[in-house]
Image (cartoon, grey):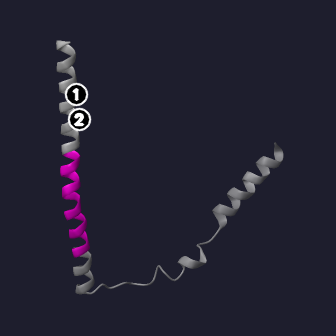
């Protein structure tokens, strides 16, 4: 039990005292400037994603409506049988 406690303490101390990763040292100072064509391309991509969501929402609505009408029909059949 004491060894487990020692291992946890050693891991905690090493995590607390560790410095930033080497890969992230230069990335924090780099500034990316996007031109208007990049922004236009990203806007077009967002428009494509939104346009693809519209038929998906319509299909989902139709499936929910179909399930609800099937439940109503099953309830009506059960009442008359």
Quadrant the N terminus occupies: top right
Name which residue lies at 20% across and 69% down.
Answer: 47
The magenta span reads 44-61
Is residue 58 found inside the magenta-colored segment of the image? yes
- Using the image as rendered, state which of residue 3 and residue 73 is in the foreground: 73
- Using the image as rendered, state which of residue 50 and residue 6 is in the foreground: 50
The relative height of residue 81 versus residue 74 in the rendered view (above or below) is above
The alpha-carbon separation of the residues under discs 1 and 2 comes to: 6 Å
> Which residue is under mark 2?
67
Which numbered circle lies on residue 6?
none
Quadrant the C terminus occupies: top left
Which numbered circle lies on residue 71?
1
Residue 3: x percent and y percent? 82, 49
Residue 65: x percent and y percent? 18, 38
Q: Secondary structure at mark 1?
A: helix
- Using the image as rendered, state which of residue 20 and residue 74 is in the foreground: 74
What is the magenta segment's predominant secondary structure? helix
Q: Secondary structure at mark 2?
A: helix
């Amino acid at each position: 039990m004491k060894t487990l406690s020692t291992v946890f303490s050693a891991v905690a101390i090493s995590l607390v005292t560790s410095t930033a990763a080497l890969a992230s040292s230069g990335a924090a100072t780099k500034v990316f400037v996007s031109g208007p064509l990049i922004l236009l391309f990203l806007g077009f991509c967002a428009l494509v994603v939104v346009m693809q969501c519209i038929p998906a929402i319509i299909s989902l609505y139709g499936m929910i409506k179909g399930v609800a009408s099937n439940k109503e029909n099953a309830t009506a059949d059960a009442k008359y049988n």
